[in-house]
Image: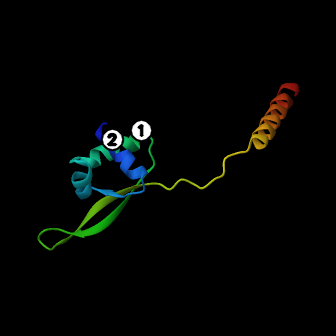
Amino acid sequence: MNQRQRILDYLESGKTLTRINSWEELGILEAPARIHELKAAGHDIRTKTVEVTNRYGETVRIAEWSMAEKPNVAPLKTRDTETLFNIGKAIVSMYHQG
């Protein structure tokens, strides 16, 4: 399994990822580069800025990544699919007649 897949699996499990826990949890040091590649490949990964305290007691801001929530939409029933198909056929035949 490559680093991108590890990150994707981690995020899809509902967890959030930062540069800090990417090293601790996944053994990935360059998480920002992998996140960039995943976004470029079309994955809907959200980025927000969070504040953490570093080892010197300073407050710093870092990126935190998560997967965008998928809409809770019920799948189409077979009957709905047939209805949509028939509507589509009717529309196509109207254009060919006119």
Q: Amino acid at mark 2?
A: Arg
Residue at 40% in and 56% down: 66
Q: Give the quarter of the figure containing the C terminus.
A: top right
Q: Give how far across and how far down residue 46 sits, in percent.
A: 41, 55
Q: Is tag 2's residue or tag 1's residue first in the polypeptide sequence?
A: 2
Helix, strand or loop status at disc 2: helix
Which residue lies at the image location 66% right of the left edge and 47% below the top edge? 75
Q: Residues at badges 2 and 1 in contact (C-beta under 8 Å)?
A: yes
Vertical comparison of 87 with 53: above or below: above
**Vertical arrangement, residue 67 with respect to residue 60, above or below:** above
Question: What is the quadrant of the N terminus in the image?
Answer: top left
- Residue at 43 percent across and 50 percent down: it is 12
According to the picture, the residue beneath numbered tag 1 turns out to be 41
Residue drawn where x is 28% and y is 44% of the image: 33
Seen as rendered, the residue at the extreme bottom is 57
Which of the 4 quarters of the picture holds residue 34?
Answer: top left
Residue assigned mark 2: 4
Front residue of 95/5: it is 5
Disc 1 element: loop
